[in-house]
Image (spheres, rainbow, N blue to C red):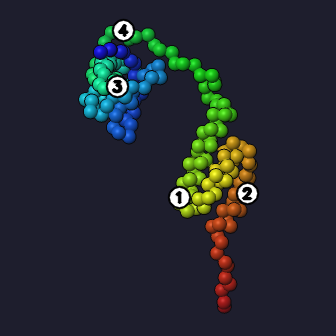
Amino acid sequence: MAKTIIVVGYTEIDEYGNLLVTDKGGGVTRIAKKRERLFTLFQQGQAVELDWQTYMNKDYVADAKLVEGALPPPVEPLSASVPVGSHSRETSTSKNRSYALSYVKDLAVADKIPVDKILSYAELFLRWLDGDIKVEDEEVFKSLLKKTFSVVETKEEP
């Protein structure tokens, strides 16, 4: 079928043992675990020619080989509307919302909070993550002391 050339940016193995190759342009290509013999070809900065085939209307990498000689021109990554290193408030809030709900769900599973209070706790945690609620170190310390040392002191008899 088609052949394409990519320059390897970095690689990682997914939870199924497939190789995920991210090229210098930001594109991601999956190399199936059953083609493990190809994995060693994908080294950072190396140009690799991919041989694509189709099976049941799905494209896959059937073979690959190292490219010698001139490399293809570099592909510029798509520019983001948000400057690198900063996040929009909306994106940050969305990520924080997911994080808060996931964390609070874990607390409910561990029986640390009641299940029917998950959304209330998640909302409080989200507000804290977004910086709407400020907690001083002294308040946290006092709260921890109350929970950790809630044992009643007893007097020793002489």
Of 96 and 86, nearer the camera is: 96
Label 1 sits on a secondary structure element that is helix
**Is 44 placed above or below 93 here?**
above
What amino acid is at disc 2?
A: Glu
Residue 58 circle label? 3
Which x, y percent locates residue 3?
A: 32, 14
Q: CA distance from mark 2 to mark 1?
A: 29 Å
User: Mark 2 or 1, which is nearer the eye?
Assistant: 1
Q: Is residue 28 visible?
A: yes
Neighbour class for label 4 at 10 Å: few (<14), some, many (≥20)?
A: few
**Is 20 placed above or below 78 here?**
below
User: Mark 2 or 3, which is nearer the eye?
Assistant: 3
What amino acid is at disc 3?
A: Lys
User: Mark 3 or 1, which is nearer the eye?
Assistant: 3
- Residue, disc 2: 138
- Residue, disc 4: 70
* Upstream in sequence: badge 2 or badge 1: 1
Residue 29 circle label? none
- Residue, disc 1: 109
Q: Is residue 61 visible?
A: no
* Upstream in sequence: badge 3 or badge 1: 3
* Upstream in sequence: badge 1 or badge 4: 4
What amino acid is at disc 4?
A: Ala
Q: Residue at x 57, y 57 (%)?
A: 107
Neighbour class for label 2 at 10 Å: few (<14), some, many (≥20)?
A: few
Answer yes or no: do the residues labelled 2 and 1 have beta carbons within 8 Å?
no
